[in-house]
Structures are given as structure tokens and as C-alpha cells.
Amino acid sequence: MYERYISQLAHVQVVTPCIEDSLEFYRNVLGLEESGRDGDTILLRGWGEHFLHSLELVEGAAPGLGHVGWRAQGPEQLEAAVKRIEAAGAGIGWADANAGRGKAYRYRGPGGHEHQIFWDVTRFKPSVAEAPLFPNRAQRFNPRGCAVRSLDHVTVATKNPAGDAKWYAELLNHRFMEETVADPEAGFGDFVVFAMTTTCERSHDLGLVADFSGATGRINHIAYWLDSPDELHRACDVLLDADVKIEFGPGRHGMGEQHYVYFREPGGVRIELNSGGYKNYEPDFETVRWSPKQGSNVYYRNLRLPHSMHESFPPVDMSKAREQMARSTLFE
Ligand SMILES: [Fe+2]
């Protein structure tokens, strides 16, 4: 039987070297709500999210990933997951409850990324002014900036995207949905340059992109959801009017079939907006394999991924990795 240990991607902790500028951006340009603080950590959420937060913003020397937070399927599944993580030698230990969640078990993936899994969560309680008209909503719809609704996924950088995806799949039953191999002429054999896994109905909530730098534990981007591609195109206008440079898009990915646009927040971390895409509920779905030429990244085959998109965070000297990146054919 296929057992679900994880119910959803719950939050991502992002490190920024300029927390006030980042906070201003997340609130007024992206349209997140500041919903609490836990010490120096700022908690933010999209207007459609029921939990207290989906983003933890912390200050640090360089932009990067703090950790990825996953909610367990239930208290028993949390205990079962912890046993499996410890047996795999990936455990770090328990963290105390904080403002946004109950006690959490910390662990590290093979690419050096820190995760935590927990069951208890704090739910957002709206003020009288924020109270929703519709009883199934967490708060009144009060669009600000891009007005993103909810966290969609996080994409991390790792030296072995397929190896990591299999590890997450075997350990905690993330479903390994799709992968892109390098162009056969690039001489990488069947090396996978991008892989994506999911714990939900969407094509992915965790992306894994090849990192040729030798660094570990880096993040490439976080992604927030909008209900329609029309809203995504409206968000592009919001970004341009806020003097935010659009790095890539708007366009549509072949993998997942999602509409996208990419840009960066003031601290440096890349943000993607998503809409559309397929839904999939099959526990035995077989991993789909793509080549870049089939449109894995660019559905309409009319764009090339800018070289800058390969930058992950914290930034490192990529000059040695430049040739390998070019050969992977994902980039110009
Ligand atoms: Fe993405």
C-alpha cells in the first residue's frame, strides 16, 4: 500500500541580507500578509492560506535557504516518518514548537538541504476587518500587489537531481513525477538536469535542478500560486510598474504544464509565479522523461532559458561550471 507521510509543503524559510527591503517587497509587491513574528523571524502568508505562514523570512549574510517545512499526514505518520529518517541516517533532531507550528523533526536531504516535518500547525485567525465574507476562506480577499494566493513549490539546486528525487521518493513517498535529461549530444549520458517530486495533486512541490558548482544546500527559487494565467499576466504589470526586472517569462513550462514568470526579491532569491498545470492523483504514476528539445522547460519552444536562471543561492563563482551548464542545453 502507498502510505502518505506528508500532506503538504507548508512553508519555506528564506534568508535575505536586507530583511526590511525584502519584507516591503513580499508585502507590497508580491502581496503576502505579515501574520506574525517569532523572535527575529518574520512570518508571512498568501491571502488564501489557512495556516499562519508559508514563508519565514530571516536575515543572514547572503540570500539562501533556511529550511523547507513539510506537514505530516497525521501524528502517527509523523512518528513513522521520523523513524524512517533516522534509519536512513538523515536525522538532525527535534526542534521546539514555534509561533507557526508544533514540534518539528529536522533532517537533511542528500543535496545538503535542511527540512523539517511536523503535524501541529497554527491556523491564521483574521481580525474583524480581515474576516472573510465566504466561510471557506481564511480571510477577506484584499488584493495588494501581485496578490498571490498560496505557496506552490520550492526548487533547490543539487549535484544529482534524479538521485535526490529517488531518495525523497523512497524515504517519504514523495512522488517522482517528471525529469529532464541533458541533450544526448551533450555527452552526459542520461544525466538528469531537472527533476520534480510532489506530495499533493500538483505536478510538483519540490523541484531539483542540477548544480555544477560543487556547493551544497542551495536554493534556486520559491514559487507562489495565482488562480489564473490572466492573474499572472496582471502580476507582470504589477512587477514592471514596481521596477522589478522580469528574469524569464511569462511563458509556459512543458513539465507540469504550468504558466510561469520569474524575478528576484531585493535580497536576491528568485521568485516564480505559477498558474494552471495538470493535477495528478496516481500513487503509481511512472516518472515522465523529457529532453529539453521536447519543450520540457519552454512549452511553446519560442524562448531559451537565460543563463542567469542557473544562478542559485547563496551565489558562488560559477565560471568553472559555465561550460557544463552550456552543454546541458538548458541554457543559452
Ligand atoms: Fe519552479
Image (cartoon, rainbow, N blue to C red):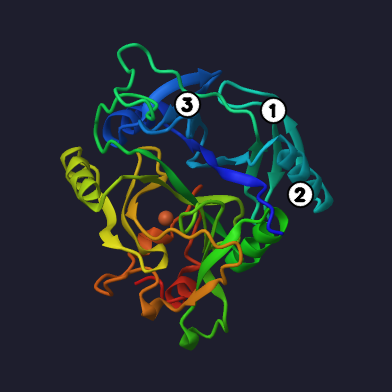
Residue corresponding to mark 2? 90
Q: Secondary structure at mark 1?
A: loop
Q: Which amino acid type is marked by label 3? A: Leu
Looking at this rendering, what residue extends furthest in the top direction? 128
User: Horizontal placement of 327 versus 286: left or right?
Assistant: left
Residue 89 is left or right of residue 258, and the answer is right
| Residue sitting at x 57%, y 20% | 99
Asked if residue 240 lies left or right of residue 174, the reply is: left
1 vs 2, front mark: 1
Disc 1 residue type? Lys
Which mark is nearer the camera, 3 or 1?
A: 1
In the visual, does 23 lie left or right of 167? left
Q: Residues within 10 Å of mark 2 (few under 14, many from 20)?
A: some
Q: Which mark is residue 103?
A: 1
Q: In this rendered view, identify the residue nearer to me: 38 or 290.
A: 290
- Secondary element at tag 3: strand
Give whichever of 320, 95 is nearer the camera: 95
Looking at the rendered structure, the secondary structure element under dot 2 is loop
